Image (spheres, rainbow, N blue to C red):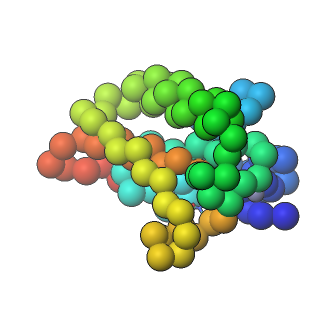
Amino acid sequence: MCIFCKIVNKEIPAKIVYEDDYVISFLDINPRSKGHTLVVPKKHYERFDELPDEELCKLMVGVKKTIEILKKLNFKGYNIVNNNGRAAGQEVDHVHIHIIPRYGEEEAVK
Ligand code: 5GP
Ligand code: ZN
Protein backbone atom coordinates (compact mmCIF):
# COMPACT_ATOMS: atom_id res chain seq x y z
CA MET A 1 0.00 0.00 0.00
CA CYS A 2 1.36 3.45 -0.87
CA ILE A 3 2.30 6.03 1.76
CA PHE A 4 -0.69 8.29 1.02
CA CYS A 5 -3.10 5.33 1.17
CA LYS A 6 -1.66 4.64 4.62
CA ILE A 7 -2.40 8.24 5.61
CA VAL A 8 -5.94 7.88 4.20
CA ASN A 9 -6.37 4.72 6.32
CA LYS A 10 -4.85 6.47 9.39
CA GLU A 11 -2.13 3.80 9.51
CA ILE A 12 0.51 6.51 9.65
CA PRO A 13 -0.05 9.91 11.23
CA ALA A 14 -0.49 13.20 9.40
CA LYS A 15 -1.62 16.67 10.40
CA ILE A 16 -5.06 16.70 8.78
CA VAL A 17 -6.36 20.05 7.54
CA TYR A 18 -9.61 18.91 5.91
CA GLU A 19 -11.42 15.64 5.24
CA ASP A 20 -14.64 14.58 3.56
CA ASP A 21 -15.95 11.38 1.94
CA TYR A 22 -13.76 11.81 -1.11
CA VAL A 23 -10.57 13.67 -0.12
CA ILE A 24 -8.16 14.12 2.73
CA SER A 25 -5.87 17.16 3.08
CA PHE A 26 -2.80 17.12 5.30
CA LEU A 27 0.33 19.17 5.90
CA ASP A 28 3.36 18.31 3.77
CA ILE A 29 6.13 16.72 5.84
CA ASN A 30 8.72 18.86 4.05
CA PRO A 31 6.92 22.18 3.65
CA ARG A 32 7.97 24.76 1.03
CA SER A 33 6.11 27.39 3.08
CA LYS A 34 4.01 27.61 6.24
CA GLY A 35 0.79 25.64 5.69
CA HIS A 36 2.00 23.71 2.61
CA THR A 37 -0.80 21.16 2.25
CA LEU A 38 -1.44 18.12 0.06
CA VAL A 39 -4.95 17.25 -1.07
CA VAL A 40 -5.40 13.61 -2.12
CA PRO A 41 -8.35 11.54 -3.31
CA LYS A 42 -9.03 8.73 -0.84
CA LYS A 43 -9.11 6.31 -3.77
CA HIS A 44 -5.69 5.46 -5.19
CA TYR A 45 -4.90 6.83 -8.65
CA GLU A 46 -1.39 7.47 -9.87
CA ARG A 47 -1.91 10.33 -12.32
CA PHE A 48 -4.26 13.31 -12.60
CA ASP A 49 -5.64 12.23 -16.00
CA GLU A 50 -6.70 8.82 -14.62
CA LEU A 51 -9.46 10.35 -12.49
CA PRO A 52 -12.99 10.24 -13.91
CA ASP A 53 -14.39 13.75 -14.49
CA GLU A 54 -16.78 13.67 -11.55
CA GLU A 55 -13.95 12.63 -9.21
CA LEU A 56 -11.74 15.42 -10.56
CA CYS A 57 -14.51 17.84 -9.60
CA LYS A 58 -14.68 16.42 -6.08
CA LEU A 59 -10.91 16.63 -5.74
CA MET A 60 -10.83 20.27 -6.80
CA VAL A 61 -13.77 21.14 -4.53
CA GLY A 62 -11.66 19.59 -1.74
CA VAL A 63 -8.78 21.85 -2.79
CA LYS A 64 -11.05 24.89 -2.55
CA LYS A 65 -12.39 23.91 0.87
CA THR A 66 -8.84 23.35 2.09
CA ILE A 67 -7.82 26.83 0.88
CA GLU A 68 -10.74 28.29 2.86
CA ILE A 69 -9.40 26.63 6.02
CA LEU A 70 -5.82 27.75 5.31
CA LYS A 71 -6.94 31.39 5.00
CA LYS A 72 -6.49 31.74 8.78
CA LEU A 73 -2.73 31.77 8.05
CA ASN A 74 -3.15 35.14 6.34
CA PHE A 75 -1.14 34.25 3.27
CA LYS A 76 -0.92 36.80 0.48
CA GLY A 77 -1.26 34.30 -2.37
CA TYR A 78 -0.91 30.61 -3.09
CA ASN A 79 0.27 28.16 -5.72
CA ILE A 80 -1.65 25.04 -6.73
CA VAL A 81 0.80 22.46 -8.09
CA ASN A 82 0.29 18.93 -9.38
CA ASN A 83 3.25 16.83 -10.57
CA ASN A 84 2.72 13.79 -12.81
CA GLY A 85 5.51 11.33 -13.55
CA ARG A 86 9.15 11.24 -12.43
CA ALA A 87 10.15 13.60 -15.24
CA ALA A 88 7.77 16.17 -13.72
CA GLY A 89 9.03 15.68 -10.15
CA GLN A 90 6.33 13.33 -8.87
CA GLU A 91 7.80 11.34 -5.98
CA VAL A 92 4.64 9.78 -4.53
CA ASP A 93 2.56 7.85 -7.06
CA HIS A 94 -0.80 8.74 -5.54
CA VAL A 95 -2.44 11.80 -7.10
CA HIS A 96 -2.02 14.86 -4.90
CA ILE A 97 -2.52 18.58 -5.30
CA HIS A 98 -0.05 20.84 -3.51
CA ILE A 99 -1.40 24.05 -2.01
CA ILE A 100 1.58 26.29 -1.24
CA PRO A 101 0.69 29.49 0.63
CA ARG A 102 2.80 32.53 -0.22
CA TYR A 103 3.53 35.35 2.20
CA GLY A 104 5.52 37.80 0.12
CA GLU A 105 9.23 38.53 0.21
CA GLU A 106 9.86 36.84 3.57
CA GLU A 107 8.66 33.25 3.07
CA ALA A 108 7.63 31.82 6.41
CA VAL A 109 8.64 28.17 6.71
CA LYS A 110 7.23 26.20 9.66
P1 5GP B 1 5.56 15.14 -5.30
O1 5GP B 1 7.03 15.43 -5.49
O2 5GP B 1 5.23 13.68 -5.50
O3 5GP B 1 4.67 16.07 -6.09
O4 5GP B 1 5.26 15.52 -3.80
C1 5GP B 1 5.29 14.58 -2.77
C2 5GP B 1 5.21 15.37 -1.49
O5 5GP B 1 4.84 14.47 -0.46
C3 5GP B 1 6.54 16.02 -1.07
O6 5GP B 1 6.35 17.43 -0.96
C4 5GP B 1 6.86 15.36 0.26
O7 5GP B 1 7.41 16.26 1.19
C5 5GP B 1 5.52 14.83 0.72
N1 5GP B 1 5.56 13.63 1.53
C6 5GP B 1 6.24 12.49 1.24
N2 5GP B 1 6.05 11.56 2.19
C7 5GP B 1 5.21 12.12 3.10
C8 5GP B 1 4.63 11.65 4.32
O8 5GP B 1 4.85 10.51 4.77
N3 5GP B 1 3.83 12.51 5.00
C9 5GP B 1 3.56 13.77 4.53
N4 5GP B 1 2.75 14.54 5.27
N5 5GP B 1 4.09 14.24 3.39
C10 5GP B 1 4.90 13.44 2.68
ZN1 ZN C 1 -2.22 5.36 -2.65
Q: Left of 95 or right of it: where is 7?
A: right
Report the quarter where the N terminus lies.
Answer: bottom right
**Which one is in front, 17 or 4?**
4
Farthest residue, direction left = 105
Q: Quadrant of residue 77?
A: top left
Q: Left of 98 or right of it: where is 106?
A: left
Tag count: 0
Q: Quadrant of residue 70?
A: top left
Residue 93 position in % (x across, y down): 66, 65
**Which one is in front, 31 or 85?**
85
Residue 99 position in % (x across, y down): 45, 44
**Residue in the image at 76% along x and 53% along y:** 44
Can you say whether 2 is above or below 27 in the image? below
Tell me which image quadrant ligand 1 sits in: bottom right
Q: Left of 66 or right of it: where is 33?
A: left
**Residue in the image at 62% along x and 58% along y:** 47
Residue 6 position in % (x across, y down): 80, 56
Residue 16 visible? The answer is no
Residue 94 position in % (x across, y down): 68, 58
Can you say whether 7 is above or below 69 in the image? below
